Each structure stands twice: as structure tokens, then as C-alpha cells.
Image: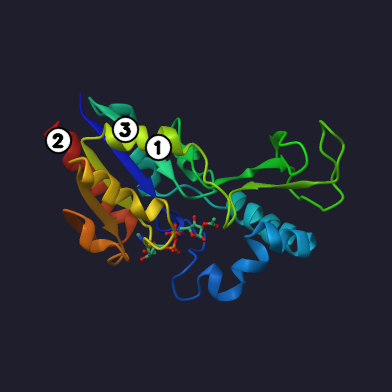
């Protein structure tokens, strides 16, 4: 049985209207990531951090999955082998597009996490610094997002998937943030075939065996059709 492991980044949700981080007009050109995406920034100014993620949660609720999300879900439900989707995205567009068992290595916008006791619960639409944890009552509610300097989620499971894969595909990610940017090298090191689908070459483009460039809503459905035809 063939196992395809897919890593997605902000580029797959760009055509759904969610901003990417590092493109022209990307989120990190408007916000200082040290202020809104680090534990230190949250300790300094929780109001600002909540405001940033509340706005992103609202954007996400108004966005719809696009043809790339639904194509991957279709692949997952119809491919004769196994398809694992790992995403760096904190939106829920893979799930709303029909995908299941998505690994959110950088957390989820729709999750809340207590910084005091690690309890997790569904995020309220608007999170505020005074919100109390339903388990321990501490006013330490934060978005369940992996910030810079924190360990991404489910890494053991991810490395197991990579080492047992037949094909690794990275979609819409710039290859700037590790450990995800290193997955292509990790996969190649154990003989896994690798493919990049992106608008333009990523920072690690040279490491892939093959690549196709274009908007995700074009290149992803085309690639999925080919895989299903060949299987
Ligand atoms: P980036 O913003 O760094 O990169 C987005 C990638 O998507 C770029 O390679 C673009 O060329 C590509 N792209 C843009 N529009 C596209 C389209 N329509 N179709 C296909 N590709 C398109 O986003 P990520 O690589 O996902 O982490 O960023 C990785 C992590 O950095 C994020 O998870 C986030 C961020 O800081 C945290 O916040 C912890």
C-alpha cells in the first residue's frame, strides 16, 4: 500500500482569502511576529495577541475551503493507499473541505489552551485576557497556537509518517520555518520521493525531486487527478 504524506502551508489557504505570512502584504509585513507570535510577546501584551488571533479567527470563519482543500480531501477518501495531511495552518479549511485526521502541527485557531494548567477547550469567538480556564479558573487563557520558541505538536507521529512514506508533497509553504522546512530533507534521507507544489520556488526548492508551480487551486486538483488516474 502506498503512503502519501502531504505538508501544507499558508499558500493553500491564500485563495480562500486568508493572508500568507511572508508574501508581499503578508501578515509578517504588518505585524511584528515577536509581539504576536511568541510567549514573550503574549506576556508583554496579551490584549494585542488576543486581538490578532481574534481577527484571524473571524477571517477564517468568513472564509470557505477552496478547490485545493477539496481536492486533497477527495484524494484522501478515494486513493487506494494512505494519505496523511500535516498542516502548518491554524485554520480549519482542510476539515471543512472534507479532510479527516489532519495533523495541525502549529495548533488551531479554534482551540483555547490554559497557560497555567494545559487544559484545552473550544475557543470562544473572542478571547480576552480576563477569560478564566474552565478547569483551574486561572485567567491564563491563550489561543492553542504553537508560537515561535515552542515545540510543534505531534512531532514523533509526523516523523513516523515521513519515514514510512512513499511520496512526500509540500504545498504552499515558503520553507522558512523549521522543523517543517526540514521535512523534505528528512524524507529524502530515507529514500522517499519528494514533490513541491507552490506558487513559486520555496527556500528549500533545491531539495525536492520535482516541482510544479502555480496557484494551489490549479496545481493541486491537477496533481490529484493524475495520482488517482495512475493508481
Ligand atoms: P509563508 O507565508 O511563509 O509562505 C507562503 C507560501 O505560499 C509561499 O511559498 C508562497 O509562494 C505560497 N503561495 C502564496 N499564494 C499561493 C497560492 N495561491 N497557491 C500556492 N502557493 C501560494 O507561509 P508558511 O510557509 O505556511 O507559523 O509559514 C510557515 C509558518 O510561519 C506558519 O505556520 C506560521 C508562520 O510564522 C506560526 O505562526 C508559528
Mark 2 close to ligand 1, CB under 8 Å: no
- Determine crowd level at label 2: few under 14, some 14-19, many 20+ residues with C-alpha closer than 10 A: few
Q: Nearer the viewer, mark 1 or mark 3?
A: 1
Marks 2 and 3, how far apart at CA: 16 Å
How many dots with numbers? 3
In this view, the residue in front, 42 or 10, is: 42
Residue that badge 2 annotates: 229
**Residue at x 62%, y 71% (from the top left corner):** 31
Of pointers 1 and 3, the one earlier in the residue sequence: 3
Does 80 appear above or below 178?
above
Q: Which x, y percent locates residue 45?
A: 78, 64
Does 222 appear above or below 81?
below
Of pointers 2 and 3, the one earlier in the residue sequence: 3
Label 3 SS: strand
- Residue 158 is marked as 1
Question: Is residue 163 shown left or right of residue 231?
Answer: right
Give the quadrant of residue 3.
top left
**Observer able to see residue 99:** no
Label 2 SS: helix
Residues at marks 1 and 3 touching, judged by CB atoms closer than 8 Å: no
**Residue at x 27%, y 55% (from the top left corner):** 197
- Residue 83 is marked as 3
**Residue at x 55%, y 68% (from the top left corner):** 27
Q: Which x, y percent locates residue 178?
A: 43, 56
- Quadrant assignment for the C terminus: top left
Label 1 SS: helix
Amino acid at each position: 500500500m502506498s503512503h502519501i504524506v502531504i505538508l501544507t502551508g499558508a499558500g493553500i489557504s491564500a485563495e480562500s482569502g486568508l493572508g500568507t505570512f511572508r508574501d508581499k502584504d503578508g501578515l509578517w509585513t504588518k505585524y511584528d511576529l515577536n509581539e504576536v507570535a511568541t510567549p514573550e510577546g503574549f506576556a508583554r501584551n496579551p490584549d494585542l495577541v488576543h486581538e490578532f488571533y481574534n481577527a484571524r479567527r473571524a477571517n477564517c470563519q468568513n472564509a470557505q475551503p477552496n478547490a485545493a482543500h477539496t481536492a486533497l480531501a477527495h484524494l484522501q477518501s478515494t486513493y487506494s493507499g494512505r494519505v496523511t495531511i500535516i498542516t502548518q495552518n491554524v485554520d480549519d479549511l482542510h476539515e471543512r473541505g472534507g479532510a479527516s485526521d489532519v495533523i495541525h502541527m502549529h495548533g488551531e485557531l479554534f482551540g483555547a489552551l490554559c497557560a497555567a494548567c494545559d487544559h484545552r477547550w473550544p475557543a470562544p469567538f473572542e478571547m480576552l485576557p480576563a477569560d478564566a480556564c474552565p478547569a483551574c479558573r486561572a485567567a491564563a487563557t491563550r489561543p492553542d497556537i504553537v508560537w515561535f520558541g515552542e515545540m510543534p505538536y505531534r512531532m514523533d507521529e509526523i516523523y513516523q509518517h515521513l519515514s514510512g512514506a512513499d511520496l512526500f508533497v509540500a504545498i504552499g509553504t515558503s520553507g522558512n520555518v523549521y522543523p517543517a522546512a526540514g521535512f523534505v530533507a528528512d524524507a529524502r534521507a530515507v529514500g522517499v520521493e519528494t514533490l513541491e507544489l507552490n506558487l513559486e520556488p520555496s527556500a528549500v526548492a533545491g531539495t525536492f525531486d520535482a516541482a510544479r508551480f502555480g496557484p494551489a487551486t490549479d496545481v493541486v486538483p491537477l496533481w490529484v487527478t493524475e495520482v488517482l488516474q495512475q493508481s
